[in-house]
Amino acid sequence: MTVTGNQPPPLTGADALHTDQRTGAAPPRFLDQPLLGVVSMAAFTLNEQGRINHWNNAATELFGAGPLQAAGRSPASLLRLPQEHRGAFEPEVFGHVWCGACMVPRADDGRPAEVGWWVYPVEPDGDPGARNVRVLALAADLRRLREDGPGLAMDDVLVAAPDGDARRAAGARLLRVEPVLAPPAEPPGDGHPEGPLDRRLAELLPAVGAAATDAIVSRVLAHGRPAVSLSITVRLPVVPHAGDMPRALRIRPRAINPPRPAADRDHSEKGAPGADENETLTFLSEAGQQIGGSLDHLQAARTLAEVLVPRLADFAAVELLEGVAADSAQPAADLDETVTMRRVAVAHNDEPGLWDRLVPEGEVLLPARDTPFVRAMRTGRPVHVPRVDAEYAAGLSASFGGRDMRPLFTGRDLLIVPLIARGRVLGTFKLLRKPDRPGFDDLDLAMVDELARRAALCVDNGRLYRREVQVAQELQRSMLPADPPEVPGARVHYRYRPAGQAAQVGGDWFDAFPLPGRRLGIVVGDVMGHGLTSAAIMGQMRTAVRTLAVEDMRPDLLLRQLDALARRLGEGYVATCLYAVYDPVARCCSFANAGHVPPVLVSESGESRVLPVPAGLPIGVGGEPFETTEIPVEDGSRLVLCTDGLVERRGRDIDEGLEELRGLLAGPARPLGATCDALLGALATTAPADDIAIVAVGLDGIPKDDVAVWELEPEPSMVPRTRAQVAFKLAEWQLEAVADTFQLLVSELITNALLHGAGSIVLRLIRGDALLCEVYDDGQDMPHLCHADATAESGRGLQLVSHLAAAWGTHRTDGGKVVWFEHRLPQVTGPPPAGGR
């Protein structure tokens, strides 16, 4: 049997608060037994500057900081409070009571403490002592309550004792402890706080004088008494039914509830709200599930309005702060004359469309500061008007820009409830009951308060969730390539489709980038997991691949370096990756794989095959070497790389998906963009379970007539001879306009290779969108740009290359190094020369 304390018990105990039947409001009861609680309460107060000016012994025990360490500091700096809860302790923005829970690291050892909070505003008045107390914060150790027992009792029947053995003997176990506020007690007749609860609360306050203490206690208790909501499991013995209850197990009520008035009995018999407590609990449970069933904050607000009508009201409208509704900013901490709101939901049980003109959804509102709507948000408490008369209705109409709202408000019971989550106001919702319906009673108000608390959390959670998703998606979009590169000899097309669920922002990445020698680097990868962390790791992986690719290392060496980097960064850096390099001059592709889906190659004739690339282990696992596989390709071929989201399905082997992909790619060539779209249409759903990335590359190759290669003997006479050969080739390519400058730069690179290099020297020219010159030698010393003095006889060669060339660089090869530069071609208006692109 599970017993859930839906009505919270008050908190009592040493250095604590306590209440009983002698206070203004009776404690909650279960099976006609009073239910009381005991818990140690930490207490501290803040002055007008938001600094701690009182700190009791229980606060030292809970937070690990003594009174001297706490005095004069702000709670945020001392307790390292979460950012979203700091506003509850800032007097300049504080306007309502806040009740909640959060993890707070202890000041002495950093161990996290799970703290339940009851934080009260104390409005200043004429008493100097009271003005020195601006905020009263009460706190309790929730973990201690669950694990050590709060000492709960039902009158003289012990349910959960502080001693663990007694608790186990009783068969009771606490499942959940949540701080809440019990309804405010009725004030004593003489206007001064009396009773044990008041006296205990007064003992937690600093010595500010009896009059100031009474004033502070009265204002604090008017906001609601500190309480906890509990879920308890109890082992309940059972016996066979024999027609009556065994005498030993009969419950003798300690008090008999007074009979209800006849009007209430008639009201209950008609099934009015609040007549059946079981029905009430069922309604709250179902309504809470419906409100929390969506991660969209606007949908949660609409559901709130729908569940309130007609169960609790005949008309309901939810209005959120504009920043909350638009999800453009953190909820405002202070509400001034510039506050704007938006009506996001309206529900009623009148004829459809009756109130659409007066209260349209989506309308932006500018409520005046003295309206009950703003007053509810500023005080954090509902505003209840039992019957709206004509004069009051006219005043409400004025707050809506002069629109005549009197038909909606006049004669009705009005309730305006603030939506508050994590110490910040999100908006309000207003409820109206028709004149022929009884007004809101205490049970109705309690139900509305509970729904407001749940709905505010759902709205705020939806808003935060949407912000997180937007950040993750924006991060992912910023790290993925925008447009494919334009490189000679190849055409690249991308397609990307994110996962159907917004929370599944993943770590799929793809990229294509030019490499030295007119080659093309292609990479497709998939970081394990989803969410913001995976997107961030994906960005780091992509950046690392680009950085390593500039070094022009073999694909297997690049993956080895990437794997070592991932293992240094942390255990969570695990990803599959396929890296390919296409050489349009040599007409071959080199591949290295780290546990990724193999690529598909389609020949010019339309034959497709899954390339036999070694699988390898994912990046970040380590322990096994990677392999480079080189495959010759013919001009006109197509290469398709993808992530597993395209071919992997639940209940189907991935090889079957690859075979289906291969079959779709076979056949006559189509434009690459159309090919990618056809793959998405055939293999992907509109809301895939995982991200999908596709990279399609047309392997066109560079015509042989656009490439010239010379193997040079390392001797001084080769320099003028090479200049002549280059001039002849430029004339053949009809590029005489750049011949002088180009020959000068070629001479500088060849001379450097002759003087500072080693072994044989190879010169290669490639004509494309620019004229590329590459000089290979076997030396290991990399040239670098240096500053030559005015009297220096050397050292100006690379300065000249850097000044005259469009770009230049150097990189290592397996046997030596390459120094290269690019020279812009003159703009031509006629047809391209023979053999050109």
Image (cartoon, rainbow, N blue to C red):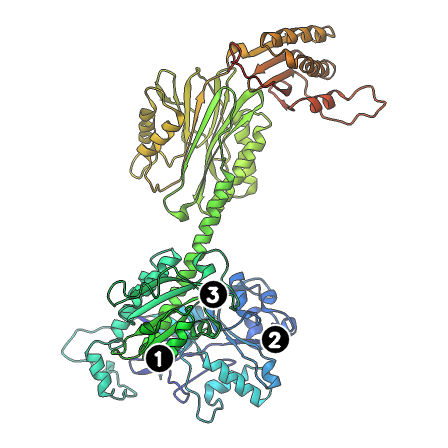
Q: CA distance from mark 1 to mark 3?
A: 37 Å
Q: Nearer the viewer, mark 1 or mark 3?
A: 1
- Residue at the location (57% across, 81% down)? 124
**Residue found at the far bottom of this picture:** 190
The residue labelled by disc 3 is: 422
Cα separation, mark 1 vs mark 2, equals 41 Å
Compared across the picture, whether 229 is left or right of 411 comes to right
Q: Nearer the viewer, residue 802 or 614?
A: 802
Q: Are marks 1 and 3 in contact (CB under 8 Å)?
A: no
- Callout 2 amino acid: Glu
Q: Vertical placement of 484 versus 608: above or below?
A: below
Q: Residues within 10 Å of mark 1 (few under 14, many from 20)?
A: some
Residue type beneath disc 1: Ala
Residue to which mark 2 is pinned: 48
Q: Contact, CB < 8 Å: mark 2 with mark 3?
A: no
Q: Which tag, 1 or 3, sits closer to the chain's start?
A: 1
Of circles 1 and 2, the one toward us is 1
Q: For label 3, count other residues whose C-alpha is less than 10 Å away and answer few (under 14), some (14-19) or many (20+).
A: some
> Dot 2: what SS?
loop
Residue 790 as seen in the image, left or right of residue 679:
right
Amino acid type assigned to the residue bearing label 3 in the image: Arg
- Label 1: which residue? 390
Element type at marker 1?
A: helix
